[in-house]
Image (spheres, helix red, strand yellow):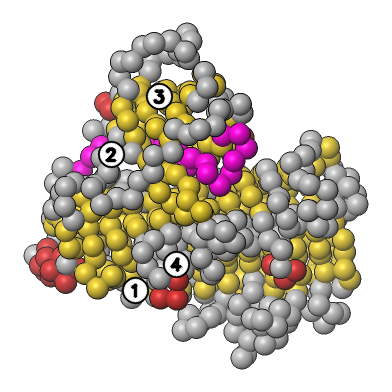
Amino acid sequence: MTMQQLGNGVRVYPAPALAVLRDEYTVRVRPICQEPASFDDADESGWRTVPVYRVRVDMHDPRESSMCYFDFNGRVEVEVVVNGWYEMYRADIRPLSRGVEPHIVGRNRLVFTLDKPANLSVEINRNRVRNLHLFAGPLKPERETADVTVHGSLEKPSTLSYYEINQEIEAVLASGRPRATVLIEPGYHYIADGTWRIPSHTDVVFAGGAVVEGSLIIEHAEDVHVHGSGVLYLNDFKRYAGTNGIVIGFSRDVTVEGLVLINPPHYSVFLGKSQSVTIRNLKSFSCEGWSDGIDMMACEDVEIDGCFLRTSDDCIAVYGSRWQYRGDSRNVHAHGCTLWADVAHPMMIGTHGDHEHDGDVLEHISFENMDVLEHNEYQANYLGVMAINAGDKNTVRDVTWRGIRIERITHGRVLDIETKWNKDYNPAPGRLIEHVRIEDVDVTTGTVTAGDEEPSLIGGYDAEHPVRDIRIVNMRRDGRPCTTLADANITVTGNASDLDIVG
């Protein structure tokens, strides 16, 4: 079935009985053929209620927030009702670049329309903690058949026996089929022993309404695809268990797409020594220390596309060698993502490498068309929306940031490009940073309290560990072009050469 055959429609997924929901918002959605004449009419036809899940955010003061998701094609009207004591006087729908216009109706009702998929933050009266994260995905044909089906029930939980499922996968592959498809039906599923090691040549489909509690491990595997409209839930795993949402280690040709990850205590997605990995339209939340979004060690040919990451550590980080994962990192491309760092960096490169030998090379890395909703960090070594902190004798080169929109910095800085010796993590300083291009960056400072944005830093650790060839083109602060480093609020700390800024 093609998207044209699907027509103008919306698909809402039921929440299983054990899913942890919130009632602060009531969300409804319906398909529309044309823009409503009035958002306050009494037409009640076609509405469908969307379940609203609980997520937790901000490790400094962990609090509950809300998330909902649905899929659609064509045009839809969305209604959000605040079920609280306060009256709605303002509504913001971010990222602002999406151009979604909120319409407040009466005391506590908000209505807006969408004509394309979007991952959004709906913020009432400027509240960015008790906000509603609304994920409106593309409507795709539902899979009706699979080689292996994990049956589910909306009324009672089930145990996902990975051992039995993997035996069935092996039988499918042994029959001569090139790959096996596993369909996880709607319902609440516990992964036995907490982790599922997914074998090669496997396609795992999360049906909408499937909530799976546990971690997915893809190690020493190839040709693995995990996708769908379901939820991977890890809120009940303890912080020091160090459990990741999804691990991709020593693997190649892996795709992760469409899932929502709720509160893994460690990384949402960890990549180690892997190649040809695509992560698309992933949505994740975290509220613990070291609970980064997407981190990679010694990886090549990685694409991160259209993700929404609200994390309590780095949203996306690119490193060299660490732990058992050894080697350079190159050809990493992130684009079309929305990043919200309640703690640390939205985008980070360079800290870890092969310090025992000659370091690693991290190269050909780009971030394009990115919306940054928040950067909030107070520790001096970890500031920067766009950060290259080369340590461990690493060389970082050929990095591009293009089309970056920074909506808010509670505390931090825009740029931090340094070869440095962070003695918390680095036995040695970084070797070199070179060939960095920063183009079309918009910084909004109007919501920042005076003094909360610190000057950006560019500099080398010393003359033997320099930074060179940094070009900044079309940076704007509150719409005003930056033609000098002072305009851009950038300080050069020394040991840096060939810096150029063009308005």
Q: Residue at x 29, y 50 (%)?
A: 19
| N-terminal label among 3 and 2 | 2
Q: Is residue 170 left or right of residue 502?
A: left
Q: Position of residue 167 (x, y in %)?
A: 13, 70
Which residue is the extreme one toward the front? 85
What is the number of the mark on residue 13?
2
Q: Which residues are the magenta region?
A: 124-143
Q: Residue 64: within the magenta?
A: no
Does residue 313 sit above or below 134 in this rendering? Answer: below
In this view, the residue in front, 76 or 296, is: 76
Verify CB contact (< 8 Å) between mark 2 and mark 4.
no
| Mark 1 Cα shell of 10 Å, populated few (<14), some (14-19), many (≥20) | many
Distance between the alpha carbons at the discs numbered 2 and 4: 26 Å
Q: Residue at x 51, y 18 (%)?
A: 105
> Which quadrant: the N terminus?
top left
Q: Residue at x 48, y 14 (%)?
A: 39
| Mark 2 Cα shell of 10 Å, populated few (<14), some (14-19), many (≥20) | some
- Callout 3, which amino acid? Val
What is the number of the mark on residue 265?
4
